[in-house]
């Protein structure tokens, strides 16, 4: 199911980008792309690996709390 969700997400993002390029002016789309690029960088730095760490540490915490 994950691959289907990823594929459909990629298709929807492609359609969205085509619609946005046809409806926005060049300056507006450039500003949108610039802001989206910075948002992607900020999200990468902001996650700081915590999404993967939570997958590891939360189950350990739950199992440790059940043992005590």
Image (cartoon, helix red, strand yellow):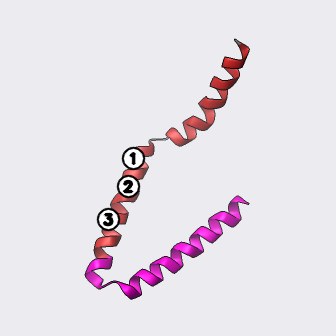
The circle on residue 32 is none
Residue 8 x %, y %: 63, 71
Q: Is residue 67 left or right of residue 54?
A: right
The circle on residue 41 is 2
Q: Is residue 20 left or right of residue 9?
A: left
Comparing marks 1 and 3, which lies closer to the viewer? Answer: 3
Indicate whether residue 9 is drawn in magenta.
yes
Question: Of residues 61 and 3, which is closer to you in this image?
Answer: 61
Circle 2/circle 1 CB separation < 8 Å: yes
Read off the residue under disc 1. 45
The secondary structure type at the circle numbered 2 is helix
Of the numbered discs 3 and 2, the one sitting upstream in the chain is: 3
| In the rendered image, the vertical position of residue 17 relative to residue 61, given as above or below | below
Residue 34 x %, y %: 31, 68
**Which of the 4 quarters of the picture holds residue 35?**
bottom left
Q: Is residue 38 left or right of residue 48?
A: left
| In the rendered image, the vertical position of residue 13 relative to residue 24, given as above or below | above
Read off the residue under disc 3. 35
- The span picked out in magenta is 1-29
Q: CA distance from mark 2 to mark 1?
A: 6 Å
Residue 42 x %, y %: 36, 52
The secondary structure type at the circle numbered 3 is helix
Q: CA distance from mark 3 to mark 2?
A: 10 Å
The secondary structure type at the circle numbered 1 is helix
In which quadrant of the rendered image does the C terminus lie? top right
In which quadrant of the rendered image does the N terminus lie? bottom right
């Amino acid at each position: 199911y994950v691959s289907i969700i990823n594929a459909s997400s990629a298709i929807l993002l492609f359609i969205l980008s085509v619609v946005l390029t046809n409806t926005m002016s060049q300056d507006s789309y450039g500003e949108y792309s610039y802001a989206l690029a910075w948002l992607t960088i900020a999200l990468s730095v902001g996650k700081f690996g915590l999404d993967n760490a939570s997958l590891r540490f939360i189950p350990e915490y739950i199992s440790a709390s059940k043992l005590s």
